[in-house]
Structures are given as C-alpha cells and as structure tokens.
Image (spheres, helix red, strand yellow):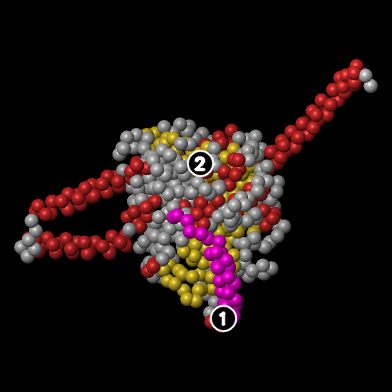
C-alpha cells in the first residue's frame, strides 16, 4: 500500500478510533460514577449517658421518643450492643477507631478517667486511624457536629493537634470538651460532687489541726514568730488565690463552642444549642447531598447539667432530664426528616446509640435524681463490668438494605461500626494494626444470627474488669467478672460518695475465684454460678482464661493519654478568644431555628 493510500486509511479510520476511545472512557466514567453513587452515606448519632431504659422501643413508657422508636420500626434494634468503655472519652475513642482504648493509651490507672479541662495535653493519638480519616481519603465529605471530648492541644494553645479536623473531619461545629455542671450557672460543680467523700474525710482533721495549733500558740505552749509564718502564709495565700481564680473562670476557660478551628462562643450558651446543632447538621447534609458523606452527631444530651429549649421544658414526667430526652429525640427526628425530604434515605445508613449507660450518681443540688435509666441491668456509667454501664441502646436503619422491625440479640460492640461502614464503602481495613471491631452487616441483614465476637473484653479504665463469652454454635452467653465496685451506701446500685465508681484499690472487691454469670438466664447479674455448678463454672473460666491470655499478648506498653500529667490544666494550652484570664466572645452566626419544634 502506498503512502497516500495508507494516509487515507488512517484519516478515514480516525473517527472510528476516536469513537472507540470515547466509548471506553465513557464506560469507565459510568463505572466510577456508579461506584460513587452506590457508596452509602452515613449519619451516626451518639447520645451522651443515655440509658437503655430511657427509650420507648426498649420498654420505657413514661418518656416520649417517637423519632427513635420510628427508626427501630424501620430498621434493626440491637438488644446486646456493648460500649467498649463505661465513660465518655475512651468509649468515643473506641467508636471512632474500632479498637480497645487500652491499645493506644486512652485509659488511666487513677481516678481521673476522662478529660476535665480544655487545656489538658492528652488526646486521641494522631497515629490512630478513625473511620472519618479513611472515608475522607476515599472521597467522602466528613462532618462532625456535637461533642468531641478527645483532646485538643499538645504544646501550645492553638496547635489543635488532637482537633477533629486532624482526625479526618472536613467540618466541625461543636464542643471540644464536655457539657459539665460547671458550664451552667447555678447547676453545681462536678468537682465538689466527685470530691465529697475526700472533703468530708479531710475537713475534721484539717480543722482539728488548725485549732490545735491556734490554741497552743495563743497559750504560749508553742511559740511561733510571726516572721517565720510570713513565707508559708504568703505561699498558701498565693495558691488559694490561683485556685479561686481558676474556679471563678472555669466556665469561661472550659465551656467552649467552636466552628472548625475558631472559637465562636466562650463560654458556650446552652440556650437553643440543640436547635443550632440540628441546623448545622441539616446544612451539612444539604451541602453534600450529591454524596457520599459521613455525618457524625455526638449530642451533648443527656449529660449533666441538663438543659432544654423553652418548647421542651416541663414536657416530661421526669423533670429536666426527661425534657432533655424529649429534645434529643426531636433532634434525631428533624435530621432524619431532612434525609427523607432530600430523597437520601434509601442510600443512607443511620445509626443511633449512646456512649455508655446512664449516670446513676447524678443528682441535682436539691437532691433530685438526674441520672438515666439502665432498665433491668445492674450498675451504670463508670462500671466497666456490669451491664448497666456498657449495654446501650442501638438502632440501625437503611431502608434499601436492612429489614424493618428486626431485633438482634447477639452480642455486638460500638467498635463494630468502624469495620461495618468501611466494608460497605469498599474500603480495606488497616492491616498494620489489630482492629477489634467486626463487620456486623450480615448479622443485621439476617444472613446469620451468630455474634461475630466469641469474646468481648470489658475494661474499667486500664483494668480488665470482665469478659463476655458467646460460644460458637451455642445459644449460651457467659460473663466472668474479676472485681466489682463497692457501692456507697451499701446496698445501693451506685457509688454516691465518689460520684463515679472507681476501678482499683479499696474502691473495689476482688473476686477469687471470679464470678460467673449466665446472662441468658440472669441478665440482671444477681445470681452467680454456685459450687453445685462447679463443672460448668470451671469450663467457662478455663475458656475465658485462655482468651484473656491471648488478648493480653496482643497488648503493648504505650504512653497514657489520661495520665495525671496529661489531664492537668496547663495555662500555656488554654484556648481563649479574648485576653486571659477573661476569655469571652459570642460570634456564633447560626440563625434562629425556624423549623418545627414539637
């Protein structure tokens, strides 16, 4: 063929070649678009200190939770959903990472088991991988609106090393620390509540020593020159002055509202805070309705101090606690309604749960009970071994993929959400670390009824408190408890003198041999197996002992993020939107709520 003929052939064939290439590119684009469109959106609700007995679909008939109940009617209700920890900070860390908090130092060996100050130096280690980070790396828009409580700064007041934006979230609107009594004028203090026993024990000795020294000095028995008293007196006065300044400014320094990296309200105004959270959540969904997106909404409700907007005050039979539950339910309903309005529900997995059980020791300054209802289960928040502290409400809804009104009785963990949502999004799990959470989607769909966890390890801070065993191919469910809190007063179901049960020393009773409970027959944990069940007891203890040994071999020493040094307030880490010590501002531009309230 001549050059002219060859050139003519190429020219004539060029349109066909271009058409062929175009078709290939179009097919690839359609495939990629299809994959993006098929990836689900996620809306994850997390209540704070909500007991399993506070929700209508779990048996409560005195509080109204129609929105949460409606989720259960349209989705899957989990009756044995277990939080990986019984207090806020480690439980939330486990939820985000799919790993036991003991693996990366989010536990403590002291009474301080969570962050109390905005200027603490500990936090969720940057080496940990959250589901938000992995989803963001694979094209998801990621937003967090609500309570963080996983640290903020490392070395200076604005490095924000532990900030949600450094853990995979594109957008953050919320509370970096916590909703404490001290954040509300006239609602008391978490410090006096937690130190009541120490104050009561120390006060008589301190007063006795003071009056003894005073009397001996006045009588001339113990001559003390005024000059020698000057330096200690000045030192003591300076320390007392700093302490008074700290507590007088606690609300300003620690009760903060942020948007991304900026402080927008200090101290936070809780008036209509839930409505502002709802507004920001709906705006995030509207901005990203072409998907895929992750929206994580960890509410401030129903942690004390309780609050509710005017429309909800007095709406319940249970005082302001019940009012805040009603407002929480309304907020869930409004955000879910936005998914329906924007035609996103068919491709959105919604999850609702609580970070741990209800706080039984919470009482108002007047003595009214402010804690949650943990149903038939023993204990509550802070108790890592008893069901009341770790068995939480949990509901998942996805109309296209999950059956309606399904109930799952098998053991699941809040760590499972990590593995489940990543698997659904087609994202491989990290291979460089142990992931404790399991993909529970087959269980949710009804493809299996067996728990993905043969063993679950229940920690009280850094101490292994109990182990749950679900033997394969069996309907049995056993629990081994190594120690129990000593309730105060005796015979109660809580630790009222210390405001929260502690995990070691004279605060607990060690069990040797460990207690063994049959949770199928005795979910209230009232009747441990007795000596007449020796063979069964020994079989359970042997199986659990081997599992504990294997589990402990997978743990390695890591720095504690909740050490006393990390938790203590550090002035150089204090976030402030004004000039220290008077940190005040109000730049929250969230408009007034104009939607339906009741």
- Please tell me how crowded label 1 is: few (under 14), some (14-19), or many (20+) other residues with Cα within 10 Å: few
* Quarter residue 108 falls in: bottom left
Mark 1 secondary-structure assignment: helix
**The stretch drawn in magenta includes residue 53:** no
Q: Is residue 134 visible?
A: yes
What residue do we see at 30% from left, 39% from top?
581
Q: Quadrant of residue 344?
A: top right
Residue 388: in sight, yes or no?
no
Q: Residues within 10 Å of mark 2 (few under 14, many from 20)?
A: few
Residue located at (59% from left, 40% from top):
136
Between 474 and 18, the residue placed more toward the observer is 18
Left or right: residue 182 compared with residue 295: left
**Which residue is label 2 attached to?**
166
Task: Quarter of the image for the N terminus: give it.
Answer: top right
Residue at 30 percent across and 61 percent down: it is: 198
Q: Identify the mark at residue 534; answer none if there is no mark.
A: 1
């Amino acid at each position: 063929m001549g050059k002219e003929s060859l050139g003519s052939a190429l020219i004539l064939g060029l349109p066909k070649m271009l058409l062929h290439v175009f078709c290939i590119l179009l097919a690839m684009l359609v495939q990629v678009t299809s994959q993006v469109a098929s990836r689900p959106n996620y809306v994850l609700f997390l209540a704070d200190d909500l007991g399993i007995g506070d929700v209508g679909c779990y048996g409560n008939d005195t509080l109204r939770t129609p929105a949460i109940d409606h989720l259960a009617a349209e989705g899957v209700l989990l009756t044995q959903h277990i939080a990986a920890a019984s207090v806020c900070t480690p439980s939330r860390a486990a939820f985000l990472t799919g790993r036991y908090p003991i693996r990366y130092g989010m536990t403590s060996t002291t009474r301080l088991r969570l962050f109390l100050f905005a200027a603490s130096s500990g936090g969720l280690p940057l080496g940990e991988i959250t589901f938000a980070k992995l989803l963001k790396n694979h094209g998801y828009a990621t937003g967090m609106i609500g309570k963080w409580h996983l640290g903020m700064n490392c070395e200076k007041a604005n490095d924000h090393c532990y900030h949600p934006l450094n853990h995979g979230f594109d957008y953050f609107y919320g509370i970096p620390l916590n909703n404490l009594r001290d954040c509300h004028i006239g609602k008391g203090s978490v410090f006096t509540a937690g130190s009541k026993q120490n104050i009561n024990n120390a006060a008589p000795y301190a007063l006795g020593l003071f009056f003894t020294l005073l009397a001996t000095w006045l009588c001339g028995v113990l001559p003390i020159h005024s000059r020698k008293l000057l330096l200690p007196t000045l030192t003591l006065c300076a320390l007392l002055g700093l302490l008074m300044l700290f507590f007088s400014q606690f609300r300003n320094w620690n009760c903060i509202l942020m948007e991304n990296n900026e402080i927008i309200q200090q101290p936070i105004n809780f008036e209509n805070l839930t409505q502002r959270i709802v507004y920001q959540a709906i705006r995030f969904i509207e901005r990203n309705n072409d998907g895929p997106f992750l929206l994580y909404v960890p509410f401030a409700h129903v942690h004390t101090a309780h609050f509710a907007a005017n429309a909800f005050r007095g709406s319940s039979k249970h005082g302001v606690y019940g009012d805040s539950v009603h407002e929480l339910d309304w907020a869930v309903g409004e955000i879910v309604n936005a998914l329906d309005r924007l035609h996103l529900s068919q491709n959105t997995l919604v999850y609702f749960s609580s970070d741990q059980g209800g706080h039984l020791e919470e009482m108002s300054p007047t003595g009214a009970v402010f804690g949650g209802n943990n149903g038939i289960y023993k204990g509550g928040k802070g108790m890592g071994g008893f069901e009341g502290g770790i068995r939480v409400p949990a509901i998942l809804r996805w109309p296209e993929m999950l059956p309606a009104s399904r109930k799952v009785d098998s053991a699941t963990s809040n760590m499972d959400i990590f593995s489940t949502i990543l698997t659904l999004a087609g994202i491989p799990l990290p291979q460089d670390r142990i992931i404790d959470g399991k993909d529970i989607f087959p269980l949710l769909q009804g493809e299996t009824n067996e728990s993905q966890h043969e063993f679950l390890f229940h920690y009280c801070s850094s101490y292994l408190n109990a182990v749950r065993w679900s033997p394969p191919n069996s309907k049995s469910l056993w629990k081994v408890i190594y120690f129990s809190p000593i309730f105060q007063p005796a015979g109660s179901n809580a630790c009222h003198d210390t405001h929260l049960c502690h995990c070691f020393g004279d605060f607990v009773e060690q069990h040797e041999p460990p207690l063994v409970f049959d949770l199928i027959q005795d979910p209230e944990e009232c009747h441990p197996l007795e000596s007449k069940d020796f063979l069964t007891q020994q079989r359970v203890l042997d199986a659990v002992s081997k599992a504990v040994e294997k589990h402990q071999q997978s743990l390695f020493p890591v720095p504690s993020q909740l050490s006393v040094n990390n938790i203590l307030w550090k002035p150089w880490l204090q976030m402030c939107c004004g000039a220290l010590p008077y940190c005040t501002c109000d730049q929250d531009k969230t408009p007034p709520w104009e939607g339906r309230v009741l």
